[in-house]
Amino acid sequence: MSSYSSSEPHRAPQPASLLGDEHPLVVALEDHRRAVERCVGVLGLLALAALAGLDRATWVLACGAGVGLVLAASLWARTTLRNAEVLALIIRGDGAIPVPTVRRTRERRPARRTGAVAAAHVGVTDGTSALCGDDAHLLRDELARRRFLLRT
């Protein structure tokens, strides 16, 4: 475990030092960071190509726009995965760790502050949940589990 450094009291510990390098949230955060960097790089390239003029940089703009679309889709997928890992962490009861993404999720979405309401959210939005199926017994069990979690 890492502690706050006296020379940098304003900096929170890194997620990897709290959760370990192989934790799914740490991996998702790193993948998301790299996807953002790639998008910013392509946007910078597009801006430079646009400044150079369309006559000389048409092919760069066309290719960059295509790559930008692919990278935007990749960023969206990584954001979705990151958010799912944050909710999984909150559901497991580890939502109080000082990781900025977790803190923002808990502050922005009061209904997800506890592991109970986060589990309810995942149950409603996850397409593999019993709530989305047609088995009445599984649905009844899942609803009873959610009701229990919300009451505790």
Image (cartoon, rainbow, N blue to C red):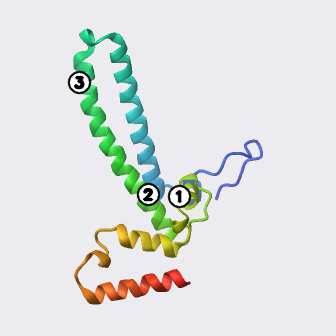
What amino acid is found at the position of numbered circle 1 in the picture? Thr
In front here: 100 or 141? 141
Q: Which mark sits nearer the N-terminus, 2 or 3?
A: 3
Q: In this view, does 107 lie to the left or right of 35?
A: right
- Per the model, the C-alpha gap separating discs 2 and 3 is 32 Å
Task: Using the rendered view, name the quadrant where residue 72 is placed.
Answer: top left
- The residue where tag 3 is placed is 62
What amino acid is found at the position of numbered circle 2 in the picture? Asn
- State the residue at coordinates (38%, 35%): 38
Q: In this view, does 96 lie to the left or right of 4?
A: left
Residue 92, percent from left and from top: 50, 72
What amino acid is found at the position of numbered circle 3 in the picture? Ala
- Per the model, the C-alpha gap separating discs 1 and 2 is 8 Å
At label 1, counting other C-alpha atoms closer than 10 Å, the crowd grade (few under 14, some 14-19, many 20 or more) is some
Q: Residue 83 carries which label?
A: 2
- The residue where tag 1 is placed is 105
